[in-house]
Amino acid sequence: MIDSLHKLKPGRCCTAGRIATSNGQCLLVNADTAVALSGVDLPEGTLVKVSGEYDGERLRVEGLTVVHTPTARDETHTGIPLGAALRARAAMYRELRGYFERHDFLEVETPVRVMAAGTDPYLETVQCGESRLQTSPEFAMKRLLSHGCERIFQICKAFRGDEITPLHNPEFSILEFYRAWQPVEMVIDDVEALVRLCVPRLSEVVFERRTMADVVMSSCGFDLQACTSADALAREISARGLFTPRATDGWEEMFFELMVTCIDPYLSGQPPTFVTHWPAQLAVLARRDPNNADVALRFELYVEGIEICNGFEELTDPTEQRTRFQADMDYRSARGLGYEPMPEAFLRAMEWGLPESSGVAVGLDRLLMLRLETRAIRDVLPFWWGAQRF
């Protein structure tokens, strides 16, 4: 009988693991723990079974069997111990599912491989022949809404280009959920409750709710609502020396640069903040504010400078939605960004009738980063694209 290394109790035991060294000391390790060994001199990485006497800190080896001597070195998980990261993710998913069960949501599955993944000019899709890997399950889940599924959630994989940064991996885990017949404020409340649940150190922290116009005024010093044209935005940016706009930059390019240069650094020093009421041109799938057509009922949550989610009150007008998609496609074409097909199946569902709904996509890897207090996404992923781990 082999005892799990991370569950050893003092006394006689038989266990297994891999040889490692630290500060000249020989260790037996698995994904969860390390135990000091005495009387062993083997190459780093050797896989062994050992028996002996464990005193709670050190295992005095009496018998040892070499299972495998490595002939190559695999890339190893860095930072947080692999087992701790995996167990924390499993626990977080249990907590998420428990919340949705308590609130009468149905867990659903939708295809990962789709014919149309979206028209967003700032997202690079991953192609598989004539199809694509989903950038999110949004279109399929909204089709379920149109067939009467009123509260639904999904935990799945999503794929977006080859962007690799401390906060990005081309393949990532996503939580997406929707409430039919409910305003966006209820989804914001859900997200706040979920973050408090999954990140206990934030359970007593006050979450702020601020409009994007308010955030821009605080971080950049000008009135965003007075800058609906590219020329007006460029003048404000140049007048304040925030950065130098390029002659070819449109409104969207300048705003994204503003996010990176000014807004994101500002939010990193703020309490957890829901940024609401985004400029309408940055929310192709969101309903416009009935009181101000220049802004959309979109929100994002920023915690410690990290964007955790993106959600909105859904646009339900199929004619308007097609017009917005076409504008994206024209923008892509004009800038040579590559063709993305019109999401016809989704549009047909809208023509059938999409109920008034609100929804959100939550980055689960980033939520886990907050839970484990790390700033690097690779620390919570057992397989990270940047290390070419598979």
Image (tube, helix red, strand yellow):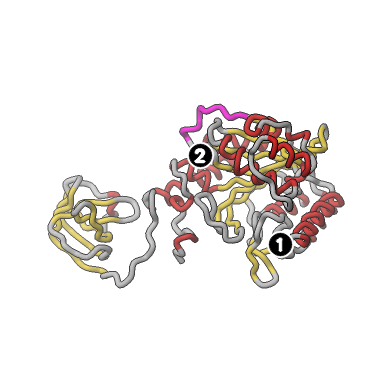
Q: Residues within 10 Å of mark 1 (few under 14, many from 20)?
A: some
How far across and how far down the image is residue 308, in percent? 58, 43
Name the kind of residue labelled 1 in the image. Leu
Task: Classify 10 Å Cα crowding around label 2: few (below 14), some (14-19), many (20 and above).
Answer: many
Residue hosting label 2: 198
Which quadrant: the N terminus? bottom left
**Which quarter of the figure has residue 193?**
top right
Please name the amino acid that badge 2 sits on: Cys
Please provide the residue range marked out in magenta. 200-208
Which residue occupies the foreground of this view, 14 or 120? 120
Give the image location of residue 198, x and y in percent: 50, 39
**In terms of secondary structure, where does tag 2 sit?**
helix
Q: Secondary structure at mark 1?
A: loop
Tell me if residue 316 comes above or below residue 241 in the rendering. below
Give the labeled residue for mark 1: 337
Q: Is residue 203 magenta?
A: yes
Q: Residue at x 47, y 34 (%)?
A: 200
Relative to the observer, which residue lies in front, 316 or 3? 316
Circle nearer the N terminus (2, 1): 2
Is residue 173 a member of the stretch shown in magenta?
no
Mark 2 and 1 residues: CB-CB less than 8 Å, in contact? Answer: no
Q: Residue at x 56, y 58 (%)?
A: 170
> Percent from the top left, x then y, of residue 33?
30, 50
At 66% from the left and 45% from the top, the residue drawn is: 244
In percent of the image, x 62 and y 33: which residue is there? 219
Q: Decide: is 28 above or below 285.
A: below
How far apart are the alpha carbons under marks 2 and 1? Answer: 38 Å
